[in-house]
Image: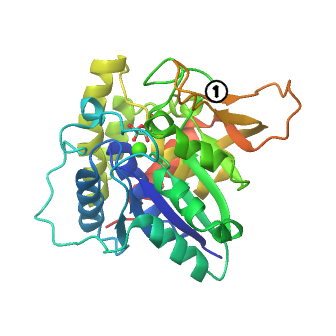
Amino acid sequence: MDKRKLILDCDPGHDDAIGILLAGRDPSIDLMGITVVSGNQTIDNTVRNALNVCQYLGLDVPVYPGSPNSLVRVRPPVAADIHGSTGLDGPVFEPLTRKAEGKHEALYIVDALRAAEEPVTIATTGPMTNLALAMRLAPDILPKIKEVAFMGGSYGLGNVTPAAEFNIITDAEAAYVVFNSGCKLTMVGLDVTRKVLCLPSVVERMERIGNRASRLFVDLVKFFNKTQKEIFGWEGGPLHDPLTIAWLIDPSVLTLKPMHCTVDIRGTEGYGRTNCDYFGYHKQTPNVDVAVEVDVAKFWDIIEEGIRRYD
Ligand code: BDR
Ligand code: CA
């Protein structure tokens, strides 16, 4: 099987960490690099978290640190209320021996794409700052991007404001650049990720696997579920980010609808909203395939399979 070459751009983050777990050992994916952005926590914390997850899971994938701030605005506050003061509260890791690479992640994306013999997929599960930087820095890389699959946005309600989702509102100008890049885009937004709730029955199912990855999964979601319950009242937190990776592994997990989508960067109450013309009323050419349905049972099967790939 030809493996999909993938760069995973994330801000771990509990659900990002499970995204790494899923991508790390899947036989259909060649995980070239993990690029890290600030978002759920500061850049120092998200980089350390990515390294801890890789070290724990034995993933020999280079980790590149990216921007601590947004393209235009000052980064809004981190999501410590959801992910804790480290950004990955819950699991206890061994002392860290893995180190981040010396190159800025945007420069890595440029160099990796220029050197790539075949187009590369980019999955973003955090703010799009570094991808936007790379696109602006070196537009010659655009044809080398096979597609961008991202967790972010919503054609319905947001989660930070009624209008906007966290990854987009954290750097809406960056998202604007990506939405207008002409690349093939797949948006895995809150409309579907809010349906993959990690209920206690799911936690028990994954716990029964009993390997190293299952212990990490359970330690992560137990903390995540607690804050999600406190803030949003769910019995199980939505596993936003792994759904994007699950789609790369098995596209039948999502139903997509092409839509014309814009990002609101005007700075009013709607700042960061992804305006998606669901009905195609304005007859503009669709620029994003937007996820509208998810096969929840299939998603949990993909998660279980991903966990079982570890010892
Ligand atoms: C997104 O925001 C972050 O807190 C999560 O990691 C996810 O990427 C959901 O809105
Ligand atoms: Ca994330």
Closer to us: 249 or 34 = 34
Identify whether 164 is placed above or below 224: above
Q: Position of residue 179 (x, y in %)?
A: 66, 45
Residue in view at x 46 percent, y 49 percent:
303
- Which x, y percent locates residue 50? 30, 59
The residue most toward the right is 283
Q: Find disc 1 in the rendering and name its residue.
A: 155
Tell me where residue 15 appears, x and y as whole percent: 38, 44
Question: Which is nearer the eye, 274 or 97?
Answer: 274
Is residue 29 found left or right of 160 in the rendered image? right
> Would residue 32 be visible to someone looking at this image?
no
Q: Residue at x 85, y 35 (%)?
A: 284
Q: Decide if residue 55 is on the left or right side of residue 234.
A: left
Residue 165 picture location, percent across and down:
49, 30
Q: Is residue 12 left or right of residue 95?
A: right
What amino acid is found at the position of numbered circle 1 in the picture? Answer: Tyr
Which corner quadrant of the image does residue 98 belong to?
bottom left
